[in-house]
Image (cartoon, rainbow, N blue to C red):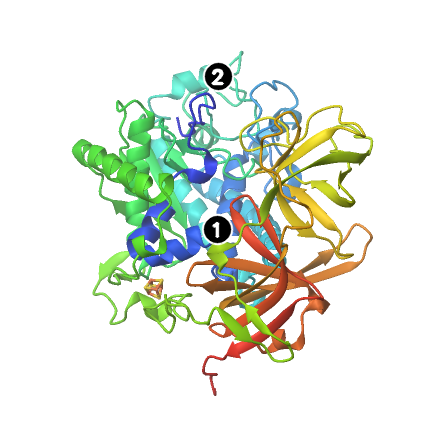
Amino acid sequence: MPVQLADLERDDVGPYSRLSASQVNTYRSCPRLWYYEKVLRFRMPQIPVLFVGRAVEEAVCRVLRESPALIHASAPADAHDPAPLDEQGLPDRSVRDGWPSQRLLPLAEKDIPDSKPALLDWAMSRCEKHLPVALERVRLEWESDERRAGEWSTVDPNRCLEMTKAGLKFHIEEVERCFLAKGGPKIDKWRNGDRPFWPAPDGFAIESFPKGHPFATSGAVTWLECWEISRPWFVDPDAAKFSMNAIHPEHWFQGEYDLVYSWDGTVSIVDLKASLGANDRSGDYVHQLQMYAMLWYITHERKEAVHSLQIWYLGHPSIKDIELPTTDELNHMEEELRTMWVNLKQEKPTRDDCPPEPAPMRGFSPGGKPKQAPKMVRCDRCDWSEVCPAGEGSDEPVLEESLQLAGFSGMTRIDTIGSLNPRASIRGELFSVSLSIGDKPPKLLLQQGHYFANINIISHDHKDGGKTWPNSLKKGDQVLVEDAIFSTNWKGEIVLKIDPFARVILDDSPLDESHDLMAYNARRNVGGRVVYTYQKSGVGRNGKTWRRRGLMLMDHTGAMKIEGWFDDWNNQYEMVETGDVVVLANIGLDAWATETRGDYSRQSRLQIIDRVERSTS
Ligand code: SF4
């Protein structure tokens, strides 16, 4: 089965702590790079090409999902409605009626392609309908991304369309193989209407057809039947992101296959790449597919192995066959990856556990063909070379513990990022409780002595299970606000934020530690190197445009994002560049889950202490 969901009773790892092929490849390419991106959460610049690949893959899958018996070549892209989804965003196997393909009238026989060229024409026309819609969707995503970089005008829609069509042409070769094999060994089962537990998405209900497949004939196999029979499994393009993973039975590794062909009784895993395949990453793709072979083998009780692994390079239309690991190699790979998971995910590594030791570069020609490695080191093109000790950065402190800032009367003490704790547990009495309508959390005002704090419940669910507030809270209840994020709002009022790591409980354990509302130091001074700046904007519920900006700051103990309203930043923000040493004084603390963040307000101050050498070009 291409999908293996977590066993919620036994899953003590959780979705955020599993290892993936891309994490393994990042770590192997450079442990420090992995640390920056996965532990400190640096985000690489989001250039259009990263989004284009997703659009091409989506368009390929949307065409594959359609049937030439139901969708005319010239029909609009939305002729096929989304499948019904369950609470987790998966195609809903409990729904039997009302699926999109059940609602479409089959086309007249003369309009159904019945030869390879006719099927090819139909598929090419469908690419032309789906690609522009998918491209526009990702363009909007790119535009709203705070790490947006580059220009969308560099995207060539014709080139994207060619790549989409290349994917479909490869698929039609598979359809032809199926036709020449008279439908393959599963044709009778298919004609009877039998469906696997996870059928390829085709707009029909998941369960088997009680009266045979609606497109089945009884004579020689048709091209339409072969289109249907050979359809590979893929993630339904309307399913929730990452909902259709294959998860290792011990829950520490997961992967999501692109295409899984199985019409001929063997399993072939295909990975789509909207690229030429002419750079170092082509080496990663080989390992990625071999890890998928391991995952398939393990999730099939070590009884079923993959028969073929392929990379379809759509930018230089070619298929690269990947060498299959032996059973011994699959078992060895599993052991190696389990050890890596223990080292990287189960026990959080420190920066010193992740040295700046990049692997040598690999060389590839278009189509992922190995060639001599380029004469360069990985750091030359690394996004983090300005802050990494292998480039212009350093692991050592870049600021004194206290500084005299211009315009400040005394010395300003700088907190290390690693020492910041934005959370506190606060005991008090509920001064007011708003009505909670539906599953909307109530608004709570807490009183502690003469002082008050707003409790802002952002997350309904606590990480350990259960809700983040008890039912039937009322004015006068004694409560403990456990591990709340201690922050202030624009008026300067104290706000205790409740994320999945915090909760409000009735105060029946008076021995639990509680902070004094007024003693908590919610404003801090931090300093270090600027990793990058970013900005974002949008339109609020009131129809007004909002704009925020911020920066990622790193010191010798950690890193944090510091963000504020666009106009609250002083004019030094405009001058800041990656690598500059700065101090941010009087910032508020904020957090989400394990990530500490800073909140820049009008009372805060940004000061550049040391500037990197500016480019003169
Ligand atoms: S600059 Fe070099 S050593 Fe540092 S993270 Fe990048 S690749 Fe790794």
User: Quick check: 577 above or below 288?
Assistant: below
Residue carrying label 1? 164
Between 449 and 182, the one nearer to me in the picture:
449
* SS class, disc 2: loop
Q: What residue is shown at x 52% (from left), y 58% (from top)?
A: 560
Of marks 1 and 2, which one's residue comes earlier in the chain? 1
Q: Is residue 403 left or right of residue 328?
A: right
Q: Is any part of residue 576 visible from this angle?
A: no
Alpha carbon separation for disc pair 1 and 2:
30 Å
Whole-percent x, y for residue 27 in the image: 32, 52
* SS class, disc 1: helix
Q: Is residue 40 left or right of residue 330?
A: right
Question: Mark 2: which amino acid?
Answer: Gly
Q: What residue is shown at x 72% (from left), y 49% (from top)?
A: 494
Between 521 and 587, the one nearer to me in the picture:
521
**The quarter of the picture showing ligand 1:** bottom left
Whole-percent x, y for residue 9 in the image: 46, 20
Residue carrying label 2? 193
* Residue 567 found in image quarter: bottom right
Between 382 and 84, the one nearer to me in the picture:
382
Between 295 and 484, the one nearer to me in the picture:
484
Q: What residue is shown at x 38% (from left), y 69% (from top)?
A: 385
Whole-percent x, y for residue 607 in the image: 59, 75
Q: Is any part of residue 98 visible from this angle?
A: yes
* Residue 366 found in image quarter: bottom left
Q: Is residue 124 left or right of residue 132?
A: left
